[in-house]
Image (tube, rainbow, N blue to C red):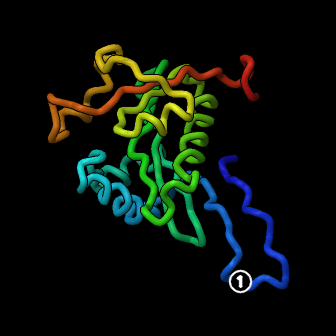
Amino acid sequence: MFKTELSEPASQSEPETTRTTEPIIRPAVVRDVPAMAEIINAFAATGQMLPRSQHSLYQNIRDFMVAVHEGKVVACGALHVVWGDIGEIRSLAVSSEWGRRGVGSRLVSALLEEARRLGLPRVFALTYQQAFFQKLGFQVVPRDSLPHKIWGDCLDCPKFPNCDEIAMIVELTPFGQGGRS
């Protein structure tokens, strides 16, 4: 359901090294956790996102999707259901060698597809990447407009209570209500 197609096969005359394929997007499995932690925590080390322990990733593995290229995890992201009417995209990270190649956008699209499948009408993200999320249909909202129950992870953040992330939200059309079904 979440797999994306590989690019067209290269012609027989092209050397193997010139063939390019897009990463496959799929649900994460436990063997992906060490690579996911490495990608996420590289960004966390620079203050761009919250760190995630392997313990936390294993506990929340069902929330995550990964992008895999030639057997290697190159990106990850999670859809965390907060309540019956809202979910959060979190821990979205793309390895440096795959940045700015559309992998993050494809991951977010797959996560939003899952949110629609689950019947979530809204999804938010707390981010420093406003332009990226705006291209995907998210709009900036005041942080205090989000329900208080979303702030649980913030208590562990070194920036709490002085958060400088941008709150963004997208309204979804559920399957069977004018959207894809």
Q: Position of residue 139 (x, y in %)?
A: 47, 23
> In the image, what residue occupies the spot 80% across and 65% down?
8
Asked if residue 77 lies left or right of residue 161, the reply is right
* 26 relative to 156, above or below: below
Q: Which residue is situated farthest in the top direction here? A: 145
SS at mark 1 in the image: helix
Q: Quadrant of residue 173?
A: top right
What is the number of callouts on the image?
Answer: 1
Q: Name above or below for residue 53 compared with residue 63.
A: below
Q: Residues within 10 Å of mark 1 (few under 14, many from 20)?
A: few
**Compared with residue 145, is residue 108 higher up or lower down, i.e. above or below?**
below
**Residue 140 x, y percent position in the rendering:** 41, 23
Residue 106 vertical position relative to residue 88 in the rendered view, above or below: below
Residue 54 visible somewhere in the drawing:
no
- Residue 63 in the image: state x and y as whole percent: 47, 43
Image spot of residue 67 (x, y percent): 55, 57
Of 139 and 111, nearer the camera is 139
Quadrant where the C terminus sits is top right
* Disc 1: which residue: 16
Whether residue 33 can be seen here: yes
Q: Amino acid at mark 1?
A: Glu
Comparing 118 with 9, the one in front is 9
Q: Depth check: give the residue in front, 63 or 167.
A: 167
Look at 15% across and 28% down and name the residue there.
161
Residue depicted at 63% across the width and 59% down the height: 24
Q: Residue at x 66, y 48 (%)?
A: 2
